[in-house]
Image: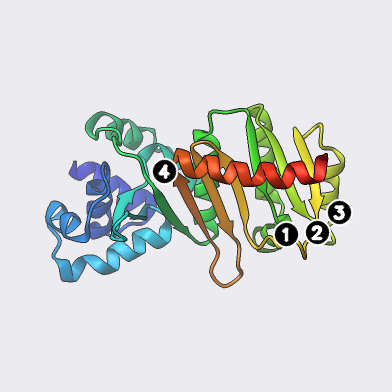
Amino acid sequence: MNDFKKQLQNVFNMSSYESRIYVVSQGEPSTISELSTQSGISRTAIYIPLKNLVSKGFISPVKTKGKRILYQGVEPKYLKNIFSRREIDLDEIIEYFGKSISNLSGEVTIRYFEGINGIYLASDIFLQESKGNLWKTFENPKIIEKISGTKHFSKYVEARVNKKIHARVIVPGNEHSLWIKEIIENKDKYLLEPIIVSPSEYPLEASIGISKPWILIIVAKEQKPFAILIKNEPLAITAESIHDMVWDRFTR
């Protein structure tokens, strides 16, 4: 175990405390007290490394029905996504975790991801966990384009198409860039069904993707961009019905 903690420290530039917290954060969501006990780090010393892990995307807060905040580590199979732009061999670590740490048994209701890298990670999880062949989304690509540029978004669209997932997209009728116009004009190539809605009637300040039982919400504000990933069948059905109502209004 110590060798793998050291590998985490070397590969991801984690501190000793951060690697210990990440390892014990796997499995069911935990309280700060539980993480403190399991990692052997005192309550007074655990706050800063835990905060660092949250900001880096390795751990996400989970809100419960009682509004308590628990913490859960991102599954090891997604470690590559955090540093997808770096060529790092993580197979040994992922294989080790796969053998020694049991799979998550409970459903995650809400997970919060900070920053642009957090948005990338939440989006990748949404894509990889989607089982259906149709997404229903509310998009404001102008906001995402401004924050993260077009390169990552284009690769994401390509990955969706490679999985043969169609997207039924509701887009506000703002002035679009040439890049967005190109995607809309080549909708068949991108497995895209877009409709344009009035930005005054349907102001979209966030992008929302629905693929039951998942909902992905991206708020790409310049100062504090973040993503929320929800896994809940009833909520996804409700969000999907709202999308259907708007869609039907403009397509009939």
Left or right: 31, with 89 as reference point: left
Q: Secondary structure at mark 3?
A: helix
> Residue 124, can we see it?
no
Q: Identify the mark nearer the N-term, 4 or 2.
A: 4
Q: According to the image, what is the colour scheme of the structure?
A: rainbow
Q: Residues within 10 Å of mark 1 (few under 14, many from 20)?
A: some
Residue type, numbered disc 2: Ser
Q: CA distance from mark 1 to mark 3?
A: 22 Å
Q: Residues within 10 Å of mark 4 (few under 14, many from 20)?
A: some
**Where residue 79 is drawn, which disc sits there?**
4
Q: CA distance from mark 2 to mark 1?
A: 6 Å
**Where residue 198 is drawn, which disc sits there?**
2
Q: Identify the mark nearer the N-term, 1 or 4.
A: 4
Q: Residue at x 23, y 59 (%)?
A: 17
Residue type, numbered disc 4: Leu
> Could you say which is closer to the camera, residue 16 or residue 110?
110
Left or right: 221, with 72 as reference point: right
